[in-house]
C-alpha cells in the first residue's frame, strides 16, 4: 500500500503515491475542513477514499508491469529472450539437441545458465521443462497467459553451439 499519513506544518492528510511506467502519480487527501482536523467517521471517510484511489492505481500498475514483462520476454522475431535451441557438440563429436536457458534470475539475483536435453525428454517435454524453469526464475505464473505465449514460442530450427 502506498498511502501515507502526513502530519506536518504544511499538510495534514493522506498522500497516495505510485509509479507507473516511470511516471509518478501522487495525490493528497486532506484531513482538515474549515481549519479543523477531522476525526471519527469523517477521518475514516477520507482514509477510505485515499485507499480506494491507491487500489485503482495499484490495478493499473500491476497491469502495466505484466504487459512490460511480456514485452521483455520476447525478441522482435517472436523468439524467447534467454532460451535457445542448440546442437551441442559432445567430446565424441556427436551433436546433441538441447534447449539452453541463460537468464538473470529474479529469485537469486544471479545469472542462471542451464540446459535441458531433448534426447532425454523429447522435444515437447524438454521445451515445457525449460519454459517452466524460465517462468520460475522470472516469477511468471504457470497459469498465466504469458506462460502460454512462452510455450507457443517453441523454436523449430536449432543452431550449432560454438
Image (cartoon, rainbow, N blue to C red):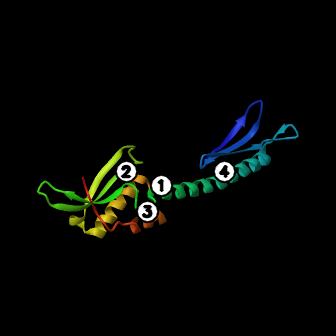
Instruction: Residue 137: give x, y in percent of width and height.
Output: 39, 52
Of tags 3 and 1, the one toward the viewer is 3
Give the side of residue 61 with respect to residue 156, left or right.
right
Marks 4/1 in contact by CB < 8 Å: the verdict is: no
Marks 1/2 in contact by CB < 8 Å: the verdict is: no
First in sequence, mark 4 or 1: give its number: 4
First in sequence, mark 4 or 3: give its number: 4
Q: CA distance from mark 2 to mark 3?
A: 18 Å
Instruction: Residue 79: give x, y in percent of width and height.
Output: 40, 62
Circle 3 sits in a helix, a strand or a loop, which is it?
Answer: loop
Q: CA distance from mark 1 to mark 2?
A: 12 Å
Numbered label attached to residue 112: none
Q: Residue at x 73, y 51 (%)?
A: 49
Q: CA distance from mark 4 to mark 1?
A: 26 Å
Using a 10 Å C-alpha cutoff, classify the residue at mark 3 as few (fewer than 14 neighbours), some (14 to 19) or many (20 or more).
few
Circle 2 sits in a helix, a strand or a loop, which is it?
Answer: strand
Which residue in the structure is indicated by mark 3?
Answer: 77
Circle 4 sits in a helix, a strand or a loop, which is it?
Answer: helix
Using a 10 Å C-alpha cutoff, classify the residue at mark 2 as few (fewer than 14 neighbours), some (14 to 19) or many (20 or more).
some
> Height in image: 134 above or below 43?
below
Which residue in the structure is indicated by mark 2?
Answer: 103
Numbered label attached to residue 72: 1
Q: Give the camera-side residue of 78 and 65.
A: 78
Q: Residue at x 28, y 68 (%)?
A: 123
First in sequence, mark 2 or 3: give its number: 3
Instruction: Residue 125: give x, y in percent of width and height.
Output: 29, 68
Residue with the most extreme right position: 34
Which residue in the structure is indicated by mark 4?
Answer: 54
Q: CA distance from mark 4 to mark 3?
A: 37 Å
Of tags 2 and 4, the one toward the viewer is 2
Amino acid at each position: 500500500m502506498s498511502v501515507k499519513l502526513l502530519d506536518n506544518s504544511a499538510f495534514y492528510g493522506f498522500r497516495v503515491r505510485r509509479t507507473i511506467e516511470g511516471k509518478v502519480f501522487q495525490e493528497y487527501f486532506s484531513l482538515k475542513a474549515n481549519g479543523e482536523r477531522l476525526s471519527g467517521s469523517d477521518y475514516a471517510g477520507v482514509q477510505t477514499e485515499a485507499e480506494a484511489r491507491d487500489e485503482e492505481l495499484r490495478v493499473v500498475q500491476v497491469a502495466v508491469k505484466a504487459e512490460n514483462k511480456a514485452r521483455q520476454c520476447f525478441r522482435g522475431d517472436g523468439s524467447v529472450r534467454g532460451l535457445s535451441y542448440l546442437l551441442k557438440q559432445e567430446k565424441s563429436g556427436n551433436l546433441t539437441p538441447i534447449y539452453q536457458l541463460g537468464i538473470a534470475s529474479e529469485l537469486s539475483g544471479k545469472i542462471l545458465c542451464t540446459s535441458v536435453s531433448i534426447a532425454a525428454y523429447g522435444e515437447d517435454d524438454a521445451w515445457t521443462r525449460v519454459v517452466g524453469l524460465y517462468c520460475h526464475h522470472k516469477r511468471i505464473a504457470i497459469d498465466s497467459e504469458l506462460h502460454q505465449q512462452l510455450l507457443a514460442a517453441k523454436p523449430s530450427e536449432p543452431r550449432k553451439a560454438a
